[in-house]
Amino acid sequence: MKTPLLSRRTLLRGIGTAVALPWLEAMGQLTAYAAGGSSAPGRRTAPNRLAFLYVPNGKDMPNWTPRGEGRLTDLPSILAPLASVKDQVLALTGLTADKARSYGDGAGDHARAMAAFLTGVHPRKTDGTDIRAGTSVDQLAAQRIGDLTRLPSLELGGEGGSMSGNCDSGYSCVYSSTVSWKSSTQPLPKEINPKLVFDRLFGQPGGPERVRRDLARKSVLDFIQDDSRTLVASVGAGDRQKLDEYFTSIREIEQRMERAASLPPVAAPAGVTAPAGIPASYGEHLRLLCDMIALAFQADVTRVCTFVFANETSNKSYPELGVNEGHHELSHHGHDPEKIRKVRAINTFHVTQLAYLLNRLKSIKEGDGTLLDHSMIVYGCGNSDGDRHNHDDLPILVAGRGGGTIATGRHLRFKDETPVTNLWTSLLERMDVRVPFVGDSTGTLSGLA
């Protein structure tokens, strides 16, 4: 008698807890996305995942841009942390966020850079409640495939931000702190607390059971041990190893959050209280949120994510890098070599966090490849040179092979003024989401495969 396949939607449940599972052999054969969705019984296709990582205030472009087109060989200094995964990275040059330009609205390039980046729409200049931009590409994906997962999308951030007020030359603060828009008038706030993200991924919302679990200060794994013991006994050796690695990963993250909670709180300006559960180390904060993305994708809790490392005009300092001045202040370097050096150090620090995420995804086996093979991780911003505030020739990376639909390990140069939204349209197609356009897109990009 043939053993029935384990449902992909199986959850391990306990008090105030519901833990999704990674792909297991017991769920049926898993093939790459590019192999096509065979309808033969027992065959499953690994879904593509899509994440957008946003970093603010532009780049030191001479030390960002690879020298030649074609194969990525020698990486420029800012991209050097990606050496171990450069075969999984596609560097793109020549893309433009045209709708981040002023169009007669004057100053406010930072706010427009973030608001237009994923929407391709020129935001309305206002510091009132009559905000308007456009639906962002992540939400176009979530609206069409979000019903396949527990969460339609996940919005994360390494820095809090106001949803009102004037933050950039007459533009509402929401524009410079929010990259994800569910509709033209509905920005989606980001979650910056790793503990709350973790609870959202693995906890049941509300209720006395959730309170009891929190008071007990136990691992979520303690509450699903009966379900997990039964599951482990029913699967093969390969699945048992994968489950052990998955559960170990969950516990390690919990332990890191516990250690973070015991450390001194993050220094905050006078009158501002730092949210509980955020590590004192900004780097550790970003890495924990990267781990949340990896877990969410591994467990198929969601397939769509945005992650804002820091807001546009962020004036965060980086004392761990020897940079005590604010990032935004330094980005207006006026060609001062010392300021440019410090901007480069910040840029490299951010890329180091990207490398952490990519290596994490690369370490997780899935079907005939890895989780990184079945992902498309976009990294970049809507400003190019922070001193010039230009929105052409954007610094854009795409990591992951998109289920075999993207040929990585290359540097591609596109014709000047090519809309960055053409890239978004191309990535949506690889999510089986087809739309007539994204913002100001004029088509798709050739040469990605």
Image (tube, grey):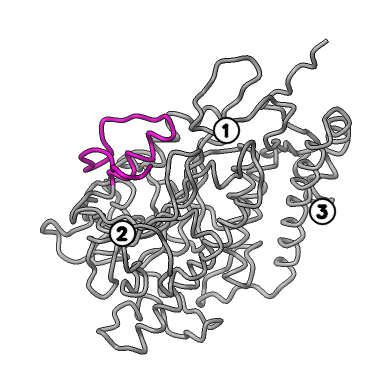
From the viewer's side, name the closer residue of 259 and 413. Answer: 413
Q: Which residue is pictured at 41% across the width and 54% down the height? A: 90
Q: Amino acid at mark 3?
A: Arg
3D distance between C-alphas at marks 1 and 3: 35 Å
What are the residue bounds of the magenta stretch?
A: 421-449
Q: CA distance from mark 1 to mark 2?
A: 31 Å
Please name which of the two marks, 1 or 3, marks the residue nearer to the observer.
1
Comparing labels 2 and 3, the label whose residue is closer to the camera: 2
What residue sits right under mark 3 in the picture? 217
The residue carrying mark 2 is 382
Of labels 2 and 3, earlier in sequence is 3
Residue 303 lies, in percent from the top left, at 53, 39
Instruction: Establish if 246 lies above or below 31.
Output: below
Residue visible at 31% across and 71% down? 61
**For residue 349, above or below residue 172:** below
Residue type at mark 2? Gly
Q: Is residue 231 left or right of residue 186?
A: right
Report which quarter residue 370 is drawn in. top right
Quarter of the figure with the N terminus: top right
Name the quarter where the C terminus is drawn: top left
Q: Secondary structure at mark 1?
A: loop
Q: Residue furthest top?
A: 1
Q: Looking at the rendered structure, which numbered label has been put on residue 46?
A: 1
Q: CA distance from mark 2 to mark 3?
A: 42 Å
